[in-house]
Image (cartoon, rainbow, N blue to C red):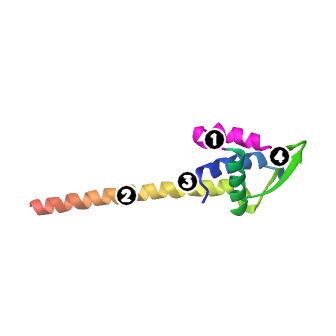
């Protein structure tokens, strides 16, 4: 399961890779996009390297590092799991909604049972 920062980076990579096999990205582009989400997403290049490595280990992306006139670049391609990232996010959201629905149903049933038991004891 990805943490919030990894989700944010993966979301950006997924959007950039949509419809293409590989995409050339600079770390500063990824960092600026992720930082736009708020101060809790401020990353250094070293932290970004760790996030990229984790996404590779989880099987979402394949990354090749390149050097263009002294600047680090990533050549990123989505794996099969990476291409299904959007569907995975939608599944997680629907599971959360179902979970909340069940909690509400169980709360209402519990309230009804307690109310009925209270009436029985009083009578």
Q: Where does the image place residue 77, in percent across and percent down from the top left?
A: 80, 55
Q: Nearer the viewer, residue 72 or 122?
A: 72
Q: Where does the image place residue 20, in percent across and percent down from the top left?
A: 82, 50
Q: Nearer the viewer, residue 53 or 87?
A: 53
Label 3 secondary element: helix
The residue positioned 63% from the left and 58% from the top of the image is: 88
Q: Are marks 4 and 3 in contact (CB under 8 Å)?
A: no
What residue sits right under mark 4 in the picture? 72
- Mark closer to the observer (1, 2): 1
In the picture, which quadrant includes the N terminus?
Answer: bottom right
In the picture, which quadrant includes the C terminus?
Answer: bottom left
Disc 1 to disc 4, how far (Cα)? 19 Å
Classify 10 Å Cα crowding around label 1: few (below 14), some (14-19), many (20 and above). Answer: some
Disc 3 to disc 2, how far (Cα)? 18 Å
Indicate whether 101 appears above or below 68. below
What residue sits right under mark 1 in the picture? 42
Q: Are marks 1 and 4 in contact (CB under 8 Å)?
A: no
Label 4 secondary element: strand
What residue sits right under mark 2 in the picture? 105
What residue sits right under mark 3 in the picture? 93
Q: Where does the image place residue 44, in percent across and percent down from the top left?
A: 68, 44
User: With 105 as the anchor, is 24 left or right in this view?
Assistant: right
Residues rendered magenta in the picture = 25-43
Classify 10 Å Cα crowding around label 4: few (below 14), some (14-19), many (20 and above). Answer: few
Disc 3 to disc 1, how far (Cα)? 25 Å
């Amino acid at each position: 399961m990805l943490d919030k920062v990894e989700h944010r980076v993966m979301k950006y990579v997924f959007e950039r890779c949509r419809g293409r096999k590989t995409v050339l990205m600079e770390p500063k582009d990824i960092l600026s996009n992720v930082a736009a989400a708020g101060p809790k997403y401020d990353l250094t290049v070293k932290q970004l390297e760790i996030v990229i490595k984790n996404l590779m280990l989880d099987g979402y992306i394949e990354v090749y590092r390149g050097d263009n006139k002294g600047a680090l670049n990533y050549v990123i391609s989505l794996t099969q799991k990476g291409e299904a990232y959007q569907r995975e996010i939608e599944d997680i959201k629907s599971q959360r909604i179902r979970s909340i629905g069940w909690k509400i149903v169980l709360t209402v049933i519990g309230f009804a049972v307690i109310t009925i038991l209270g009436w029985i004891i009083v009578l």
